[in-house]
Amino acid sequence: MTGGAERPELGAVPETALWTLWHRAVEARRPDTVLPDPKAVELVERIDFPFAERFGQGALVSQLQALRAGCFDREVADFLTRCPRGTVVGLGDGLETQAWRVDNGRADWLSVDLPETAALRERLLPPDERHRILARSATDPGWMDEVDPANGVLISAAGLLMYLRPTEVRALIAACAERFPGGSLVLDTVPRWFSRRAVEGKLKDRHYQAPPMPFGMDADERDKLATAHPAVTDLREVYPEGGREPLRTLLPLARRVRRRPSVIAMRFAATRKAGSGAV
């Protein structure tokens, strides 16, 4: 760390941007890493923050976070294959370094986050012609006005929805489906028991206490997301791939567990159909 290192001061939910960054960097430093992410390592070295003391150095947690990020990377990479000049929108983007992992050199990237986190990202990852930063809540539909859907749109909501209320989750999915017909959305969820413990302040270890997570959904409930808007289609789970032993062996078995975290991808129909429901 240098004398000019960045010293972030973030609230509880924005601070999760540092938590996820740290665990990606911990995993990326391994010679047998499941997620090469040199940009995350670089950022951790530039930030003056007691990462290890605040968040711990659990190899399992870091590997799981990296495998989760890999799920999103594969979906974005597939989108960029189909729509090489499309726009990738990162909602609650924090200090995500996905653009440095999967960018094709032609796509547009828009990072949307709360003002304090967006300001930190702007200092550490300055925007340029293809990488923009917007200081706005993901629940404020105004960010959609900054997206040109002409070449395709994929919206990534990694590590975001669990911090919203269920009604906000429903409204966000519906608004995206309405504004971006033919587009895609990738999100992740925590199970209901995990959400409940976080709300009760019981999700903590000797290093860190997670902020409240009002929205939880068990993995076998994913079809309920389709009721947010009639245009939601092609709803499927994205499973983590790879991993080191013994996790590599355990992950396929974990798919049988109903109350587990999940990454879900959906598309929005290009034409609308009648009908609606409730999450």
Image (tube, grey):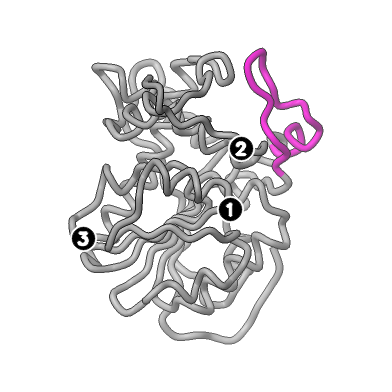
How many neighbours does mark 3 have within 10 angstroms: few (below 14), some (14-19), or many (20 or more)?
few
Which quadrant of the structure image shows residue 67?
top left
Residue 250 part of the magenta-drawn span? no
Foreground pick, 69 / 89: 89
Give the label, 2 or 3, closer to the camera. Answer: 2
Which dot marks residue 81?
Answer: 3
Judging by the rendered image, the residue that carries numbered circle 2 is 10
Give the label, 3 or 1, closer to the camera. Answer: 1
Task: Give the overall secondary structure of the magenta segment.
Answer: loop
Judging by the rendered image, the residue that carries numbered circle 1 is 114
Q: Earlier in the sequence, mark 1 or mark 2?
A: 2
**Outermost residue, right side:** 200
Vertical arrangement, residue 65 with respect to residue 237, above or below? above
Q: Which residue is at 51% across, 15% downward? A: 52
Q: Which residues are magenta?
A: 195-213
**Outermost residue, left side:** 105
In the picture, which quadrant includes the C terminus? bottom right
Q: Which residue is at 60% across, 51% downward? A: 161
How many neighbours does mark 2 have within 10 angstroms: few (below 14), some (14-19), or many (20 or more)?
some
> Is residue 218 among what the camera can see?
yes
Residue type marked 2: Leu
Query: What secondary structure is marked by label 2?
Result: loop
